[in-house]
Image (cartoon, rainbow, N blue to C red):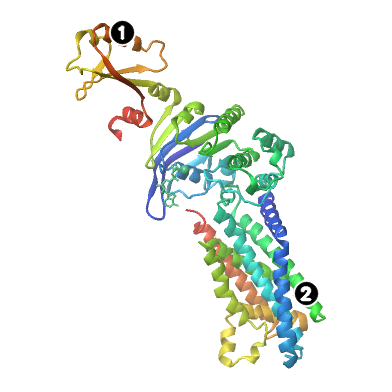
């Protein structure tokens, strides 16, 4: 294992993050605040409590997930796409490093960055509604798993993207519906039966449910189901990446 | 140090960029790969360095296969790419650290200072790469390749877009590296460049390595010049007094063509002119030409091309 190389990639990616720290923080803090004003206060005050949880509180886990998902995907996809785009990827290709080391460096950095933003979102939320977290360890574990899972997913997009349009379009087309239909703002049980069934194919549903359970002790489904679902999601992403690297497809001529 | 056997590369679009390349380069040698645009120089280097997958054939660097033993093979290699491809917002120092780190090595500040000073980048060490001039960027690419202490260095058109001064510096640097025992492989369009620094020259065109020659042999051929003498009254036939001078009479134009060694002590030109004037032949115009790479290739390869 070439640890020094992993560290090099990780550090240089984190330096990029630090350079753009203000812009990477403004967006999640601003959007979380807006969501709270609109959904938490304006609409939330007219909503009944869901599963015994006040609406303003109910949306917190979903909001954090939302910003963590978006950040993981954009960080990881950009992180690998950018050197491909400007050509500096040649350094990665010609260095004595394996695919797994490249992956740990880039995905690790992307996941760390979105983890940080998740925590900032959590703190922002806490300013609007005082939070009590029922299972803090589970909460952090879910956060980490989500950051890693969706950074892997973003990495795949970055590997496959041929241009900037694809880089921004895929997250928009795939992630936005997944997130909005993922139960961030409502409980799955509030949907008609058909849409409930559809929701079970949405990995975000499992994440939000598990994450909500770690906050309030209640979720749409048992915590074990959520864990299995995210494990499967990470497994699929890892398999796609392994296959991509094995065949050299999308990376080398 | 480098052994390429029967290497072929077809790109995804079906284009065959390299055809059955065989080449060996000894340790400590400077090898120049000479060829026109699109000959396959960059493709060949890209395969050796790991950026492009070969279609068939094998490449060994320092005895290690570039695919099955890629870690060991690549540890020996430094690459300076043809295109300028730098992460714009890193500083010079951080950019160097990144490169060395990828090769599994901890920063070596002494070495970094040495390299940066040698390449006149020391004053710019804390500047972002985006603020460097084109020539500085090229030097930074070289610094990055040297900082992980390669044993074999690939320079893909190191002097393209570089001023005369820097070109000379670059050649000096290559000589220094050679003295340190580094094997160097460079590509170029210019025979003069190959002539100035290489020990051996390979000529590549349309994906085929047409020939590999010692520089001396090549230079000898390059040294030939031709003098064309146009006469006011063109000759129909070479008179006897000119037969001895190794002249050729161009049948169509009636010009006299004289071939000589450019660096020979006696070119025989003075003798030619005085013989002509002694015999009352009036010269209208003269012109000299040097054999081009193309001429040499045709000359050396005969009907192989
Ligand atoms: N990714 C690619 N897909 C298809 N064809 C390619 C690709 N890259 C290069 N080629 C083709 O392969 C041939 C050799 O290209 P290469 O870049 O190796 O030439 P070169 O000798 O380095 O030329 P130059 O002197 O212009 O740098 C060219 O005809 C080029 O069009
Ligand atoms: Mg080239």
| Element type where label 1 sits in the image | helix
Q: Position of residue A227 (x, y in %)?
A: 67, 76
Judged left or right of residue A233, residue A21 is right
Residue, far left: B236
- Where residue A152 sits, quadrant-wise, is bottom right
Q: Splitting the image into 4 quarters, where does residue B289 fall?
A: top left
Apparent side of residue B166 relative to residue A116 in the rendered image (left or right): left
Q: What residue lies at 56% left-to-right and 36% top-to-bottom?
A: B152
Classify residue B108 by image quadrant. top right
Question: Judging from the image, what secondary structure is the residue with disc 2 in?
Answer: helix
Does B280 sit above or below residue B84?
Answer: above
The residue indicated by pointer 1 is B274
Q: Residues within 10 Å of mark 2 (few under 14, many from 20)?
A: some
Residue B22 percent coordinates (x, y): 42, 37
Parent chain of label 2: A
What is the x, y in percent for residue B209?
A: 39, 37
Percent coordinates x, y for residue A145 in the rendering: 68, 70
Foreground pick, B276 / A201: B276
User: Is the C terminus of chain B in the top left, top right, bottom left or bottom right quadrant?
Assistant: top left
Residue visible at 56% across and 85% down? A198
- Drawn side of residue A105 relative to residue B274, left or right: right
Q: Residues within 10 Å of mark 1 (few under 14, many from 20)?
A: few
Is residue A133 shown to the viewer in this render? no
Q: Closest to the observer: B216 or A40?
A: A40
Q: Relative to B184, is A46 above or below?
A: below
B289, B201: nearer the viewer = B289
The answer to whether residue B121 is above or below residue B232 is below
Q: Chain of mark 1?
A: B
Measure the alpha-carbon separation of dots 2 and 1. Answer: 98 Å
To which residue does mark 2 refer?
A124
């Amino acid at each position: 294992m070439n640890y020094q190389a992993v560290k090099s990639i990780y550090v240089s990616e984190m330096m990029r993050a630090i350079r753009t720290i203000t812009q990477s923080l403004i967006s999640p803090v601003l959007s979380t605040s807006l969501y709270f004003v609109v959904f938490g206060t304006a609409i939330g005050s007219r909503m009944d409590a869901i599963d015994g949880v006040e609406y303003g509180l109910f949306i917190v886990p979903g909001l954090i997930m939302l910003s963590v998902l978006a950040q993981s995907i954009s960080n990881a996809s950009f992180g690998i796409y950018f050197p491909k785009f400007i050509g500096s990827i040649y350094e990665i290709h010609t260095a004595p490093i394996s695919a797994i080391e490249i992956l740990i460096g880039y995905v690790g950095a992307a996941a760390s960055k979105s983890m940080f933003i998740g925590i900032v979102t959590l703190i922002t939320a806490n300013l609007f509604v005082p939070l009590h977290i029922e299972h803090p360890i589970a909460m952090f574990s879910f956060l980490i798993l989500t950051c890693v899972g969706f950074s892997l997913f973003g990495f795949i997009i970055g590997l496959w993207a041929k241009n900037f349009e694809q880089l921004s379009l895929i997250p928009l087309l795939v992630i936005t519906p997944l997130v909005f239909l993922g139960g961030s703002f409502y409980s799955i049980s509030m949907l008609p039966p058909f849409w409930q069934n559809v929701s079970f194919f949405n990995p975000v549903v499992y994440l939000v449910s598990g994450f909500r359970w770690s906050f309030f002790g209640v979720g749409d489904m048992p915590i074990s189901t959520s864990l299995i679902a995210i494990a499967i999601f990470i497994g699929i992403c890892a398999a796609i990446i392994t296959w991509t690297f094995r065949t050299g497809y999308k990376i080398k001529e | 140090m480098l052994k390429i056997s029967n290497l072929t590369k077809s790109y995804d679009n079906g284009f065959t960029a390299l055809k059955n390349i065989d080449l060996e380069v000894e340790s400590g040698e400077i090898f120049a790969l000479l060829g026109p645009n699109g000959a396959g120089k960059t493709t060949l280097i890209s395969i050796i360095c790991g950026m492009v997958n070969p279609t068939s054939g094998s490449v060994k660097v320092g005895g290690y296969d570039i695919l099955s033993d890629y870690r060991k093979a690549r540890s020996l290699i430094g690459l300076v790419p043809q295109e300028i491809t730098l992460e714009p917002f890193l500083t010079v120092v951080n950019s160097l650290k990144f490169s060395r780190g990828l090769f599994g090595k901890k920063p070596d500040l002494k070495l970094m200072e040495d390299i940066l000073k040698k390449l006149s980048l020391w004053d710019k060490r804390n500047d972002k790469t985006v603020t460097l001039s084109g020539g500085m960027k090229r030097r930074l690419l070289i610094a990055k390749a040297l900082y992980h202490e390669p044993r074999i260095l690939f320079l893909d058109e190191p002097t393209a877009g570089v001023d005369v001064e820097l070109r000379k510096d670059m050649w000096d640097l290559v000589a220094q590296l050679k003295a340190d025992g580094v094997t160097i492989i460079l590509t170029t369009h210019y025979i003069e460049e190959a002539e100035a620094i290489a020990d051996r020259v390979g000529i590549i065109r349309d994906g085929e390595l047409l020939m590999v020659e010692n520089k001396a042999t090549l230079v000898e051929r390059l040294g030939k010049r031709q003098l064309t003498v146009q006469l006011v009254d063109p000759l129909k036939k070479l008179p006897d007094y000119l037969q001895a001078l190794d002249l050729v009479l161009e049948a169509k134009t009636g010009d006299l063509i004289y071939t000589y060694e450019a660096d020979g002590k006696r070119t025989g030109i003075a003798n030619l002119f005085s013989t002509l004037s002694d015999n009352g032949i009036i010269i209208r115009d003269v012109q000299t030409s040097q054999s081009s790479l193309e001429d040499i290739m045709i000359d050396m390869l005969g009907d192989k091309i």
